[in-house]
Image (tube, rainbow, N blue to C red):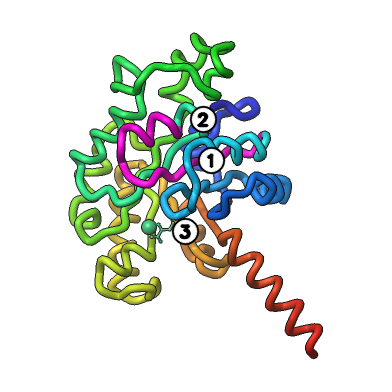
Amino acid sequence: MKQGNKSFADRLRSGELLIGTLVSLNSPEITEILAEAGFDWLFIDAEHGAYNPQQAQSMLQAAGQCPCVIRVPAGDEIWIKKALDTGAAGIIVPQVHTAEQARQIVQYCKYSPEGSRGVGIGRAHKYGLSFEDTIKNANRQTAVILQAESKQAIENIGAIVKVNGIDAIFIGPYDLSASLCRIGKVTDPEVIEAIGKVTSICKKAGVRLGIFGVSADAVKPYIKKGFTLITAGVDTLFVIKSAEEILAECRG
Ligand code: 3PY
Ligand code: MG
């Protein structure tokens, strides 16, 4: 879906630095607060968050002009179709391990003739008011973001980035650390080396890079390395941090 003059997908492709945060709670109010706080985009996490497509759509409605990208639970046609029909600015697909999987996901995301996205009416089409316009422009205006977060994805990254239609590779450092038997150790040298490999291959291929970190300190080194699709922090962690700080201050 287009936000303002330039779509989120165009801003991503042009290499604009886009700082977002992860929304894990099924709460339009929290989504609204984070959008108002000024993030460039919101990462709506339907992979781990306990919400369904209709609830994800309510969060998009609450976000107003702030672009929302839905992370679907898997590279599954039904979820991708529903997420795109909510009017998300794009989707993030977790656990993409092979070029074949990547090709299949791009197919699900693109309308004919580039792909096989199902044709229906949803919020993305203003419920039918902008059907023609949406089906004409959606392929260009929808960001397709795939996660590299497994040993197998790192091995296959050269082939994955050659698949047409991918706008960014988003590294999931936590799943990657688990896949490399370093669970939770996102700064372990083996994890850093794997991220380095993805970084150089994506840069050579001209594919944008994204990453998640729980804090500004966790993502800043990657911004310096040219990552532009940044997810910093998680709604629940913001609440925990502030709650703990105020309690500690009050208790002296
Ligand atoms: C991970 O770290 O595995 C992620 O997917 C972060 O979003
Ligand atoms: Mg992950």
Residue 130 to residue 193: above or below: above
Determine which quarter of the picture holds residue 176. Answer: bottom left
Q: Which residue is mark 1?
A: 56
Residue 206 to residue 157: above or below: above
Q: Which residue is mark 2?
A: 86
Q: Secondary structure at mark 2?
A: loop
Along the line of sight, the residue nearer the viewer: 6 or 135: 135
Q: Position of residue 188 (x, y in %)?
A: 34, 76
Q: Would residue 79 be counted in the magenta stretch?
A: yes
Asked whether mark 3 lies closer than 8 Å to ligand 1, one says yes
Decide if residue 22 is in sight here.
no
Segment colored magenta: 65-83
Which of disc 3 and disc 2 is earlier in sequence?
2
Q: Callout 1: 10 Å neighbours few (<14), some, many (20+)?
A: many
* Circles 2, 1 touching at the beta carbon (< 8 Å): yes
Ligand 2 shown in quarter: bottom left
Q: Position of residue 247 (x, y in %)?
A: 74, 80
Which of disc 3 and disc 1 is earlier in sequence?
1
Q: Secondary structure at mark 3?
A: strand
Q: Callout 3: 10 Å neighbours few (<14), some, many (20+)?
A: many
Residue 112 to residue 48: above or below: above
Decide if residue 130 is in sight here.
yes
Asked whether mark 2 lies closer than 8 Å to ligand 1, one says no
Along the line of sight, the residue nearer the viewer: 105 or 161: 105
Q: Would residue 210 be counted in the magenta stretch?
A: no
Along the line of sight, the residue nearer the viewer: 34 or 216: 34
Inspect the image, locate mark 1, and give the three-letter code of the amino acid beneath it.
Answer: Ala
Along the line of sight, the residue nearer the viewer: 236 or 105: 236
For marks 2 and 3, give the CA distance.
Answer: 24 Å
Compared across the picture, whether 80 is left or right of 23 comes to left
Q: Residue at x 50, y 60 (%)?
A: 224
Q: Which residue is mark 3?
A: 212
